[in-house]
Image: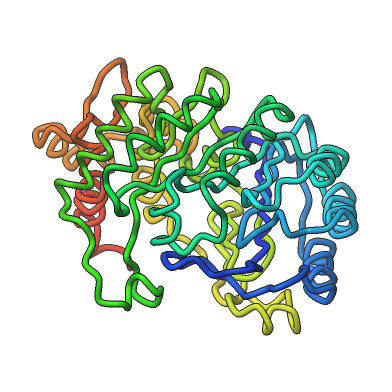
Amino acid sequence: MASSPPLGVYIHIPYCRRICRYCDFVHEPCPASVPHDFIDSLVHEIMTSSSGGVVDSVFLGGGTPSLLTAKDLQFIVGALHKKYDIQSPEFTLEANPDDVTTEKLNYWQEYGINRISLGVQSFSDDTLRFLGRRHTAKTALDAAAKIAETFENWNLDLIYGAPPLSSWKKTLAAALSFDPPHIAAYALGYVPGTELGDCGLKPYADLTVLRQYRRAEEMLSAYNHYEISNFAKKGKESRHNLKYWRNEEHDAYGPGAYSLRGNRRQCNIPFVESYIVDPLYKAEDQILSPLQLKLETMIQHMRLKEGITEAYYYNRFQENIADQFGSILNRLIADGLVHHKNNTYFPTRKGFYFNDTLGLQLVSRFENIIDV
């Protein structure tokens, strides 16, 4: 086996001042600050359950990590440095626009955060109201300007497929006016259990949503469209998220957070109050079969423009990719979903558009062999 690349560490901060209508992440209403007992439990989990290792990416996600105070960050970052060998990290914090203040910009940098993922979602007030966001378009514009002045590496999170459809082109134009190094554009989901998913509204037709996706491709053509929903300038791809898309090892802390070490996947309990009581309890603790790990690795790599090389697969699994996946890859090539060139399998443009279909075909080939 080849030596493992450095770990990524994800930390989930579930608290939000307002729950967005579309959000299906683990979250908890939080009108003021993040509770001290949550921070205590989070630090206890890091200090107790971490097995350490070299880390080159840390991601504070949520929820709303920008609610964290300087003292909160001091405790969290201090625990991470005690447990890990953190080397030249990409250190990302997700921020809401109305949390971007001069004070926070200063202490984010003080505690080593060098990349901000700004969740504007839209620069249209009408769209923001539909999504249930608490900030306005002006707040989003002001926050993006402050982040652009302060951070060399940052991301804008955007959502398409939300009314009014005419706002999408304007949102993309506004985003580009800040020349961000990275833009993530996600289709709006109507997930059961969320306000949008349960309110009876129907999403736009797939073709309509696809047109908005293609609009993003056109307007962001100067960027490297390196993953289905992600666009980056050269060298500004998300180091942390690439670990997920390559199915590489990562540790994760906080309620509902998933980790992967070797072939062992664990998931923390997703209920915030229960997590505070026992942050070491695992809702899932699964040993993946060799085939399951290979299959999940293939599915994840097919989200990336780079795909997967035959050499990478062999170095990781000590077998040829065609031995396990040759027949299904040939079918995907025949269907126009995958290319094979220079000893690399990678998704076509059609494979990007219909990536769920591509993934389902990979799964269907093995569903009678493993529990999927």
Direction from residue 73 to residue 203 in the image, left or right: left
Residue at left offset 14%, top offset 46%: 207
Work out whether residue 348 or residue 194 is closer to the camera in this orientation and state it. Answer: 194
Residue at left offset 33%, top offset 35%: 169
Where does the image place residue 261, in percent across and percent down from the top left? 61, 53
Quadrant in the picture for residue 50: bottom right
Quadrant in the picture for residue 297: top left
Quadrant containing the C terminus is bottom left
| Figure check: 24 above or below 316 | below
Where does the image place residue 35, in percent across and percent down from the top left? 79, 74
| Figure check: 132 above or below 233 | below
Where does the image place residue 270, in percent across and percent down from the top left? 58, 75
Quadrant containing the N terminus is top right
| Figure check: 187 above or below 181 | below
Work out whether residue 130 or residue 358 is closer to the camera in this orientation and state it. Answer: 130
The answer to whether one can see residue 286 in this image is: no
